[in-house]
Amino acid sequence: MILLLPVSEELKRKLKKVNESLRKIYPISNLDQTEIRERLSRYGKFYKIEKWKDDQLKDWLSSKTLVGVDGSVNSTKGMQTRTLSVFQALAKGTRGEEKWAADVFTPLLAPDEEEEEGQAAREAKERGKLLSGLELEVARFAIEHWHPKVVLMDGSLLHFYIDHLEAWMQVVEVAEKTGTLLVGVAEEIGTRSLVKEVFPELKNWSDRDLLYGVLQVGEAFEWEDWSPTGSQMWKMVLRSSRSPQPIGIDGLESQREYRHDLVRLIYTLTPEQGRGVPFWLDIVDNQVRVTDPLVETMVEQYIDPDLRHRLLVPKRTERVI
């Protein structure tokens, strides 16, 4: 059944045109999987991963806890310069341990020294750094106080290296000192370096596009040049569920010898029918997520009504239709 909505014929034509343009770039029969795998095997290695049984996983953890770390940010609706952003980060251990960190940010309290366009970019970068800092803060606390076997970070470790290098290096130092294994799990693969190296003729493709549907369930692929020089990280991709889209996994180069164990751990903790991310990270994500109702409730409770309506409530909220 097709739901009929009041849209213009011009919009329909333009959407069809976009579809045709996309199909030219991503044709159905552009490359077959055999050709992709054959060429990928010249640059990296495929690995078949087996899930651990419960007793094997228990032995590997050696009575230590497993920690998941995630963060979330959401903002009030309205003009970019008149918003209030709420940040939360959570480290959650499998024995019930929890460490929270939170912060708020509003451009209304920031120095107005740039044009609006430049200010928006600066504020977006500031929000990214702030959230990364909170996640690294709770991760460091977990390592120092709970001494876990593994800390699973939601997202690639590379973004911590880029967004907040100083705090990242502090976490790396304490992880290496205590023997805690750090691993990042990214549900989206945002790089283009592999496809540029292996299939340079595919100008508009990303590594995500190239790897879609290529791996078998429980199969990983490693290319040593994935991580930027200087980052001191290894990276692999893994198809951890029935979803044809693999996930990205990275860790510390100093802990490289444990990478296959970490990939196996992630595969073991991931539901076959899920989106490919370990269930424990989904639990942390669900608990830490800053939803629209949460932002609205917190603002209503802690910001004075006159300030809220003068500064943060957009006019469109008063629409009657």
Image (cartoon, helix red, strand yellow):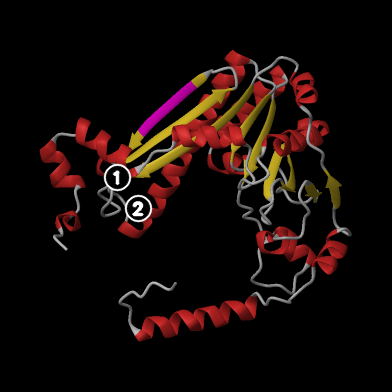
Q: Residue at x 45, y 47 (%)?
A: 125
Q: Is residue 77 magenta?
A: no
Q: Residue at x 49, y 33 (%)?
A: 133
Quadrant of res 38: bottom right
Query: Disc number at residue 107?
Result: 1
Quadrant of res 130: top left
Q: Residue at x 78, y 46 (%)?
A: 218
Residue type, mark 1 in image: Pro
Q: Nearer the viewer, mark 2 or mark 1?
A: 1
Q: Nearer the viewer, residue 133 or 278?
A: 278
Q: Residue furthest front?
A: 1
Q: Residue furthest left?
A: 306
Residue interval drawn in magenta: 99-103
Q: Determine which residue is flagged by label 2.
A: 119
Marks 2 & 1, CB-CB < 8 Å contact: yes
Per the image, label 1 sits on a secondary structure element best described as: helix
Per the image, label 2 sits on a secondary structure element best described as: helix
Residue 11 appears left or right of 317: right
Residue type, mark 2 in image: Gln
